[in-house]
Amino acid sequence: MFELPVTQFPDIVPPSVTVTAKYTGANAEVCAKAVATPLERAINGVPGMTYMSSVTSNNGTTLITVFFNVGTDPDLAAVNVQNRVQTVIDELPEEVIKAGVMTEKEVNSMLLYLNILSDDSTMDEQFVYNFTDINILAELKRIDGVGFAEIMGNRDYSMRVWLKPHRMAIYEVSPDEIVEAIRNQNVEAAPGQSGLSSARDPQMLQYVLRYTGKLFEPAQYENIVIRANPDGSMLKLKDVAEIEFGSLDYSMVSKADGKPSASIMLKQRPGSNASDVIANVKSKMAELQQTSFPPGMRYTIAYDVSRFLDASISEVLRTLFEAFLLVFIIVYIFLQDFRSTLIPALAVPVSLVGTFFFMQIFGFSINLLTLFALVLAIGIVVDNAIVVVEAVHVKMSQKLLPAKEATLEAMNEISGAIIAITLVMSAVFIPVTLMTGPVGVFYKQFSITLAIAIIISGVNALTLTPALCALMLKNTHAHGHVKGGFINRFFAGFNRWYEALEGKYKQLVDLIASRQLVTLLMLLFFFVATWGVNTLLPTGFIPTEDQGIIYVNVTTPVGATVERTEVVLDKIQAVAAGLEAVESVSTLAGYSLITESAGASYGMGMINLTSWDKRSKSVNDVILEMKEKTGLISDANIEFFSPPTVPGFGNSSGFELRLQDRSGSGSLTYTAQVTDDFIKALNETPEIQNSYTNFDVSFPQYLIHVDQDMAAKQGVTVAQAMSTLQTFVGSYYASNFIRFGQMYKVMLQALPAFRAKPEDILNLHVKNQRGEMVALKSFARLERVYGPEQLTRYNMFTSALVTGEPAPGYSSGDVIQAIIRVAQEKLPKGFTYDWSGMTREEILSGNQTIFIFMVCLIFVYLLLAAQYESFLLPLPVILSLPTGIFGAFLGLKLAGLENNIYAQVALIMLIGLLGKNAILIIEFAIQRNKEGLSVLEAAKEGAVSRLRPILMTSFAFIAGLIPLCLASGAGAIGNQSIGISAVGGMIAGTIFGVILIPGLFVLLASAGEKRKNRRKVYEEVV
């Protein structure tokens, strides 16, 4: 058990591979055309691929994410994608090739989000970032189980060469000449050694020759010689530029509780133990704080998946103990003997320990699903043991046999029933293993875990339990008197109540079983009632839980700077800090949480709430309060939402889809108009709220028009002009250097004052072929246009990512139907949509779940048909199931829950549990019928004699689920969904099933006898 990995969910997220390219100075449209398009064409169709998305930004970054089928080896997928990328690498722009195209497997499960900050105001964000990069990040990357560790933003140290274009024009110096001078004088050299031995001229001493190496101080760069004049004077870099040891990038601002910070995102390596990884990270951070942090520096944890994981697992473990206690009490009440109760109780640890052993063999983890299975197993694995113990007591009571003889005789009667029960209850879960995709993994770990526990309990009931009965039980039934005491008086009262119940039940069975029309009407009623409740019950997938954290996505007006976005985030932080339920706030200006890419007008935040037991408000309550209090912030569009329940399926709860432009028009303006109309229509539906997209083509831009004739007359080529602009405005990577044991870049760019306004660009100069400085305005002009800050593509088509949430009272299933309806009404020809994230998996799993449910029923039917050697006798087992399904649906409806994946798992489990009740009655009735009783009498005797073990096992199972039904805090919705559906199904299935099953047996067994009689008459005639 202690060697099993601990995770929130099994590895159900499809593996993905990311391809990242950097085209410095390029805008989103240029990146899409020059970088994303050729790469996508090459990658498309790579083995195992399901779909592909890409995001290009105005900072020159292209991010392509390729998703694969669940079960695909991520290492092999990364190699296949890398091979495809290499086939088109020569078609990419030179600047992209020089920066490098990175292909790496994506790790989707974020474990931690750490903030390194300082209370010392002299330590700015640049220092904190680079201290973290040098002293902390490398340590965290080496921790076993960490698959991804990066600092958000790009504040690496850099030698910034701030060019002065006006002085460069006076000295007639081009950016290319400065780049050449830097590269020629900032070098690492290998002069070799003097005095090396040789056969020609032997030497007695040898010396290693060293060069001073690359420059690493601003003063050294200032003295780089650009040109030596004939008169002996020299033009140095400091004459045309200012040199600063600054930051590589200034496009993101990270803060923790309002203070500058370095934010580290950590993700888990697949197959690792999340709890161990987090514990090791925290241990390493505590060690570094003691040994390496300067005074005033500290760290905080903005996001910790183990908080929800530990709280959820703690809730389930507490439920595990409570379930065991309640099951023990119920069994004790029915058996009324401590020794007898102890025998079924021993079945629990035996089954659980055996289950852990097989979980390790199958490579399962301890997660919420396997723990749910173990909680349910407590109520199930005692069933077979209870049946054995109860049967032994019946023999001791009726025939006054000693324990050993009673056990042998009882096992001769019930061994077949136990085998049938075990086979049916475990066989129910076998078809579930055929399910594919993430949902298949979800069902598989739950089902196989439960099936293993059931099989072990069946083996236990046929071996260990009879042995314990023979050794531990004593025949106390010969003693006619009942001793005094509260417990015995309670038992006497309970027995009188049960005997009265049994008498009334016998009368009811006699009344109904003999009237076939009543049985048929009851059966019809439950079929119709089940269908009716199902139509009223909202559908869903994986419910959104209170994970103790709120995501914030901010979009400031088009053209806004990162400083403007920072101001908005500071206001949100101030509001959140004033709420009692909020523990900490982390913000990152310049980054979009939805598309996971950079942009000055985007910002994100994470509001960490206090633990569940320390606050009275849920996540939804805090979100509503934040929306109300931030409503006065008019300078931005602010969205608050919960993270996805399953990490890796997008970055938000709710639905996710891609609106695709397949018209071939190429008009981004038309795509934006269609997207806006579509979102407006979605928000007008009652089922949907907060639908939103980042697709916006109204960002102000300027288009540069070059008069090529005029440029040619002045000896300037377009390539020269654009190269000069790229260096002055976009920045240029000229060289690199080593400092603090790290490699940093030398970046060239014009001073901000020379590129503050669009018209400043035209005052820049380009050096022509004759060595003259030509003003850009002499052959170029600017046109004000509009375009996107980010451009998203999906499966090689321009697309808009649309997200949103169900309105209160509606489920994800309702939202999907609403979207389909709106799309049919509103989308013009040439536009379509595709699902992504968790919504895509919900769509794909829809029909699969119904198919598997039907296969489970057929599987059970064929199994029982083989055992009973009849195609009619298994039908009462199958036809009695609607009573339980009706109860499950009704319980969910009354509790205000939806028919989600947890409820569907419970329904499959109910097939086995309710089938067990029917088997107990039918197995006994078949035996009595073979012994000579009529079908009706056999049915009545079977029902009455098996009522006590049926009630005992059913109530024991229900008692084990009570803690799940009453769950609160972390994981409460999942607990309640599986608990209430199972309890509702068991209560209705047990109460109505024990009434309906005898009637069904009489109906179908009588039909079988009539058929046999007709065949016998026919054979005699023949």
Image: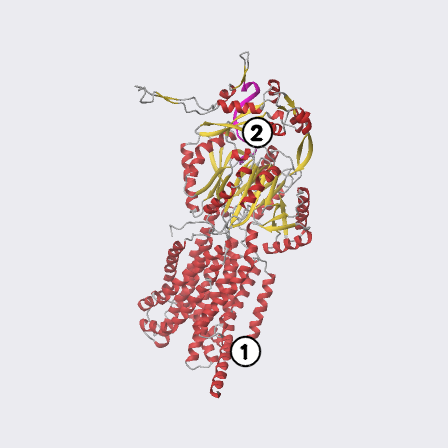
Residue 344 sits in which quadrant? bottom left
- Can you tell which quarter of the image residue 294 is in? top left
Left or right position of 382 against 263: left
Residue 256: percent from the left, percent from the top?
A: 52, 36
Label 1: element kind:
helix
| Secondary structure state at the residue bearing disc 2 | loop
Viewer-closest of 1020 and 812:
1020
Amino acid type at image mark 2: Ser
Residue tagged 1:
516
Kindly give the residue lying farthest to the bottom in the view shown.
1021
- Going from N to C along the chain, the mark reached first, 1 or 2, is 1
Mark pair 1, 2: CA separation: 87 Å
Q: From the viewer's perspective, is the residue at label 1 or at label 2 nearer? A: 2
- For disc 2, the marked residue is 731
Q: Position of residue 628 (x, y in %)?
A: 63, 43
Where residue 940 appears, as percent x and y from the top left, is 47, 77
Residues packed near mark 1 inside 10 Å, few (<14), some (14 to 19) or many (20 plus) = some
Question: Quick one: 314 or 464, which is closer to the camera?
Answer: 464
Part of the protein shown in magenta:
236-256
